[in-house]
């Protein structure tokens, strides 16, 4: 399924009935050649998040059993194909 995220927006990678969720946010580009995704996990009142940095040339990503194919990235948004 294809998705487009603007800076600060998220997508649910996993959500279940026990109120835990895994999300991915687009954090923009730190330079002309590096973009950042935030992977977050929450359960109840606990949450942890990791900033992940990738070179713009990298278009295939595997994040927690999810395969992402980056179709386009700019300072404002990222478009990708998500395969679970």
Image (cartoon, grey):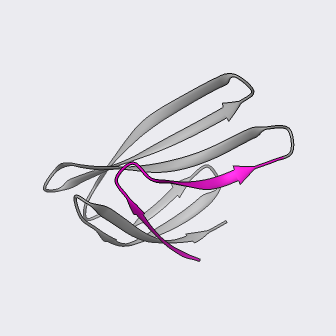
50 left or right of 65 in image:
left
Residue 74 percent location from the top left of the image: 24, 64
Residue 53 percent location from the top left of the image: 33, 45
Residue 34 magenta-highlighted: no
5 left or right of 49 in image:
left
Q: Where is residue 32, by image quadrant?
A: bottom left
9 left or right of 63 in image:
left
The residue furthest left is: 32
Q: Residue at x 50, y 65 (%)?
A: 68
Q: Which residues are magenta?
A: 1-16
Q: Is residue 20 above or below residue 36?
A: above
Where's the N terminus, which quadrant?
bottom right
Observer-nearest of 82 and 62 = 82
Q: Residue at x 44, y 53 (%)?
A: 9
Q: Is residue 62 above or below residue 16?
A: below
Q: Where is residue 79, by image quadrant?
A: bottom left
Dominant SS type (magenta): strand
Residue 10 percent location from the top left of the image: 50, 52
The residue furthest right is: 17
Total marks shown come to: 0
Q: Residue at x 74, y 49 (%)?
A: 15
Where's the C terminus, which quadrant?
bottom right
């Amino acid at each position: 399924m294809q998705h487009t995220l603007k800076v600060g927006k998220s997508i649910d990678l996993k959500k279940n009935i026990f109120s835990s969720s895994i999300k991915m946010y687009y954090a923009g580009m730190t330079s002309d050649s590096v973009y950042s995704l935030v992977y977050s996990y929450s359960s109840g009142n606990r949450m942890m998040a990791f900033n992940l940095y990738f070179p713009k040339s990298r278009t295939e990503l595997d994040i927690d059993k999810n395969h992402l194919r980056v179709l386009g990235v700019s300072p404002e948004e990222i478009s990708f194909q998500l395969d679970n």
